[in-house]
Structure formats: structure tokens, C-alpha cells
Image (tube, rainbow, N blue to C red):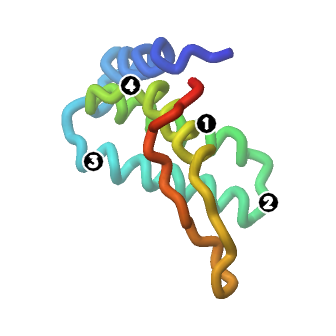
């Protein structure tokens, strides 16, 4: 299993070592958005590099998370658990959330 906390710090350190942006949050969000667009384009055009493009998206997200002092690993685990406990129903053809996770009786 990958240690996202460690990887997040390694990615940030690489950004420092190579002279990439580590201060302009707006720029980093825009660059991350650009990487998502590249991944979508690779998928849409059935290019062979879709995996590499998705890796770029992940690298940018992890770097941005470190810049913002967000423990992305913990946030992902919490969100997966939250999503697991939500309930949905198809209402008028739309998958609609009908019960929100309240965190009670959690069996983490």
C-alpha cells in the first residue's frame, strides 16, 4: 500500500528541489485543473498515456495538499467512510442523496 502522507511530502520536496511553484495557491489550482483537462483529453482521444495523465493529476493534488497543509490521506479515508454510509434513491431519474452520514455508530 502506498503511504500518501510520505508521498505528499516527497512530491513537495521535489517541487522545492526543482524550483517549481510552492507559494502561489491560485496558480497551483489552475495547473491542477490543466492536468485534469489533459487526462480528460487523453481519455477522450483514446491515447495510451491516460495513466500517466491521471498520475500527473494525483501528483498535483498531493503537492497542493502539502502547500495547504492538508493531510490528504486522512481526508480521503474520512470521505470514503462518509460516502459509504450515505443513502441514495433514484428520484425522477436522478440518483439523490436521501440520508447524510452523521458520524454516529461508526465502526472504523
Question: Compared with residue 39, is residue 8 higher up or lower down, i.e. above or below?
Answer: above
User: Crowding near pointer 2: few (<14 within 10 Å), some, many (20+)?
Assistant: few
Residue at left 46%, top 37%? 104
- Closer to the N terminus: mark 4 or mark 2? 2
The answer to whether the residues at label 4 and label 1 have Cβ atoms under 8 Å apart is no
Residue at left 62%, top 53%? 39
Which numbered disc, 1 or 2, marks the residue closer to the eye? Answer: 1
- Closer to the N terminus: mark 4 or mark 1? 1
The quarter of the picture where the C terminus appears is top right
Q: CA distance from mark 3 to mark 1?
A: 19 Å
Q: CA distance from mark 4 to mark 2?
A: 33 Å
Q: Is residue 51 visible from the viewing direction of this image? A: yes
89 or 24: nearer the eye?
A: 89
Farthest residue, direction bottom: 92
The answer to whether the residues at label 4 and label 3 have Cβ atoms under 8 Å apart is no
- Closer to the N terminus: mark 4 or mark 3? 3
Give the label on residue 27, or none. 3
Q: Which residue is mark 2?
A: 46
Percent x, y of residue 89:
66, 70
Q: Which residue is mark 1?
A: 55
Amino acid at each position: 500500500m502506498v503511504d500518501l502522507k510520505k508521498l505528499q511530502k516527497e512530491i513537495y520536496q521535489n517541487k522545492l528541489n526543482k524550483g517549481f511553484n510552492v507559494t502561489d495557491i491560485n496558480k497551483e489550482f489552475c495547473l491542477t485543473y490543466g492536468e485534469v483537462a489533459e487526462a480528460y483529453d487523453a481519455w477522450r482521444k483514446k491515447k495510451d498515456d491516460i495513466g500517466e495523465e491521471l498520475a500527473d493529476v494525483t501528483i498535483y493534488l498531493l503537492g497542493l495538499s502539502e502547500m495547504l497543509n492538508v493531510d490528504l490521506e486522512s481526508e480521503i479515508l474520512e470521505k470514503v467512510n462518509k460516502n459509504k454510509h450515505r443513502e441514495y434513491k433514484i428520484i425522477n431519474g436522478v440518483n439523490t442523496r436521501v440520508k447524510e452520514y452523521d458520524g454516529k455508530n461508526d465502526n472504523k
